[in-house]
Amino acid sequence: MAAGGYLNRLAILLSGEHPTLPFSEVCAVMRAEGIAYRVFAKHDQLLLIDAGGGATEALRERSAYAMEGGRLLAQSQASIEEFRRACKEMDWGLIKGRTFGAKAKRVRRHCEHIDTQELQSIVGEEATREGDAKVDLMAPEVWIRSVITDAGIFTYAIDFASDRHSFSSRKPKTRPYFHPGVLEPKIARAFVNLCGVRRGDTFVDPFCGTGGFLIEAATMGIYAFGMDVDRRMVIGAGKNLKHYNLDADIVLGDAMALPVSKADGIASDPPYGRGTTTLGQDVREVISGFMESAFDALKAGGRVCTASPTELRPAELATSAGFRVVEEHSMRVHKSLTRLIIVVEK
Ligand SMILES: C[S@@+](CC[C@H](N)C(=O)[O-])C[C@H]1O[C@@H](n2cnc3c(N)ncnc32)[C@H](O)[C@@H]1O
């Protein structure tokens, strides 16, 4: 293993669904799994990291927003000549004598003077000549991806690709119990990842609603404990977990008085004081009470990932409860609602 515990330089293609969450989620997964990593470069939807063993497996199993990735093979400026030169200099050892396929993709509209088909052909020619490999576009042993982004062209061997189907199979409307205002599985998964829990840990969602966050945690083998003040939600969330053959403990109760201690992480989408019930309480007081209770419920170093409308200034409430703010992400929902997602640490 290389100095510092890093094995590989990886290129990770990130979803363009949000400008900052996908990057943070990758780092959170590395941290949660105890994998040494160092961010080498951040480009538009492409992250380069040096990472220790197990990084691609962890991202495949856990990440919502890492679309695919693998060992970085080459990088060049956005010109066909430079790309060809980089391919010639590439270490083709990985595909020597194997079958391969080449794919190319452009992030947004970067460098439109470069044709993705031409990149594929160049990789094809060089891999066949230099790597003594054979093209197989149906079921190759190795897929090689070239990505055109803001900083040039990056080529990697695809080591993992996320399973998009598994998220769509858990869409809220396909569950036995549905209530409007539920976050989609991918964002729920990102919240769980951002609070830093791993398999065997205790995860808590104090405003569990229909159980979307509990489903994501339990799917990753994390013990999930949920709470809600609304009995219908407690029963409905239980049905939803059962529907996926998952286990969680779900109780009726107030997030401002969590019956838990030494939890490893908390993630939640509390009421915003608009659609969902707060039992008549002021929403700022609910969030403030939740933060104080969450502080007591967590082990030292444990994290909370939560969201509130920007005007509630959730980071201030978290700081007053004793937390340190790790990061904030702004997400526009519609004209009159921008949610602020915060990650805070005890
Ligand atoms: C936005 S929803 C959560 C949606 C949830 N993430 C899901 O997957 O369905 C907020 C939930 O907080 C619950 N709630 C409101 N005040 C609460 C409190 N003080 N303690 C616990 N739950 C509360 C509401 O009943 C509602 O189900």
Image: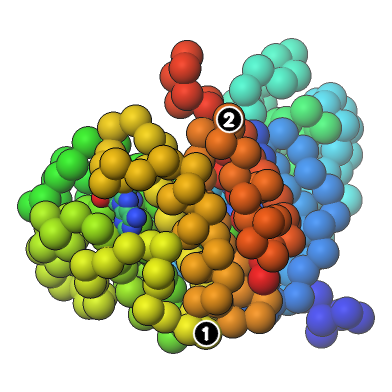
Nearer to us: label 1 or label 2: 2
Residue 295: percent from the left, percent from the top? 58, 70
**Amino acid type, callout 2:** Glu
Q: Is residue 145 above or below residue 100?
A: above
- The answer to whether 94 appears left or right of 153 in the picture is left
Q: Left or right: where does residue 243 sit relative to residue 37?
A: left
User: As shown in the figure, which amino acid type bears the numbered disc 1?
Assistant: Lys
Name the residue beneath numbered marker 2: 311
Categorize mark 2 by other alpha carbons within 10 Å: few (<14), some (14-19), many (20+).
few
Does the beta carbon at disc 2 come under 8 Å from ligand 1? no
First of labels 1, 2 by sequence position: 1
Q: Is residue 252 above or below residue 66?
A: below
How many numbered callouts?
A: 2
Q: CA distance from mark 1 to mark 2?
A: 31 Å
Look at 76% across and 52% down and name the residue there: 48
Q: Nearer the viewer, residue 22 or 209?
A: 209
Which residue is pictured at 15% across the width and 45% down the height? 178
Residue 322: assigned label: none
State the residue in front, 222 or 205: 205
Secondary element at image label 2: helix
**Residue for badge 1:** 262
Answer left or right for 99 relative to 320.
left
State the residue at coordinates (27%, 60%).
Answer: 228
- Asked whether the viewer can see residue 198, the reply is no
